Image: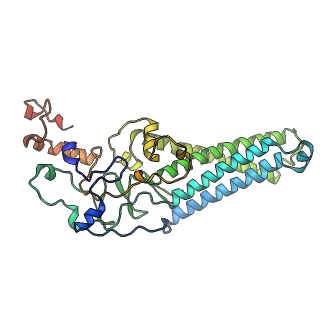
Amino acid sequence: APAAAGGGAGAAAPNGGGGDGGGGDAAAGGRPTPLPEPKCWFIYWDACGLACAFVAWFVKAFSHYAVVVHIIWPWFFNPRRVAREGVSMWGVTHFVVFQVLCVMMWVAHLRAMASNPGAVPRKSASPEDKRRPESDDPAIKYLPPRRWCATCECVKPPRAHHCSICGRCINRMDHHCPWVNNCVGHNNVKFFLQYLLYVFLGSVYALCLGVARLIVCNGGARGACGPFLSVGNVVAAIACVFAIFFAIFVGAMFCDQWEAMTTNTTGVESLKEWYQDNRSLGEGMADWCGERPSWRWFCPVSLPRATRFTYSGDYDDFDVRDPAVARWLDDVYPHLEAEGLIEAAPGSAAAGGGGGGGGK
């Protein structure tokens, strides 16, 4: 039944893009012209998201200041130690590694905030398009109902969901994250994963440096570091507390993303109890990062053009893992059997059996 009903030329590709029935041909056939997308994507009207994003940037700036100025620099580059032992290669290594982690974290965060997450074009359909024209062709009349969004005036692709904060339908929407002040969707989930990764690594690295610095200073080795409650020690301790909190927080978030990748269900789809499509973590990463294992998985660069979300313009595409679609197909299954579009399933009434379980 799914193959008979959803295998048209405009069906969405596995990456969320379109097939041959693209938007240009559709516009030529009399469909509305979609509104253009903004050149700069930024959610400036959500006060909560702006506040959370500001807090995130402040904490990152403070942690960077604390680690560099009050941990690495006085520990490895204070004038007395340099005069006595020369420049410490350990100090240079720690400084460079921490800077790389911070830069990658900042860029990934910025790209997750300022990237279009995969918005469906607004006004790409008219109200008349929300219902399919009547047809006697069984392969058309038994298709699931179209997913119309009155706010965006569009027919939503199978995995698109409307975000009330962004005010847009987002393809493969996972959730709206206030910490990046944006939806996490098809086109920016890669940056979100990188952000989680580099926040976790940076937090663990800062925590290790901070704890080691406090132990060395207050243990009396390599010279005194001042009173226990000196400004440097207090700032380093606060940075360690931040590091512990954010390491636990993003670790828990990454566990959620791990489950989403291995089941091929976003956060929204999981809440709606979509049927899972179990796969390996590597397959999930390749899907969400848009390419096979590559150094680009860890670098905040855009998805390859071929795997970015582009609206196909196919109003009748659907995903059989959607419970609403599955229920619809179960309901029309006897009609498909009766009209000879599919073979009667073993055990069904049409095959002489006693149940209607064949629709599953």
Colour scheme shown: rainbow
Residue drawn 41% across and 67% down?
Answer: 37
Query: For this view, does 218 lie left or right of residue 119?
Result: right
Residue 151 sits above or below residue 186 on the image: below
Is residue 180 something that shows in the picture? no
| Residue 333: image location, x then y, percent | 15, 42
Q: Quadrant of residue 57?
A: bottom right
- Taking depth in this image into account, of 136 and 48 the one nearest to the observer is 136
In-image side of 272 versus 357 (left or right) = right
Asked whether residue 65 is in view, the answer is: yes
List x then y, in percent, for residue 73: 80, 50
Task: Identify the residue at horizontal 66%, vertical 49% (top origin).
Answer: 100
- In this rendering, position of residue 197 left or right of residue 28: right
> Is residue 94 toward the left or the right of residue 196 in the image?
right
Task: Quarter of the image for the C terminus: give it.
Answer: top left
- Location of the N terminus by quadrant is top left
Front-most of 134 and 348?
134
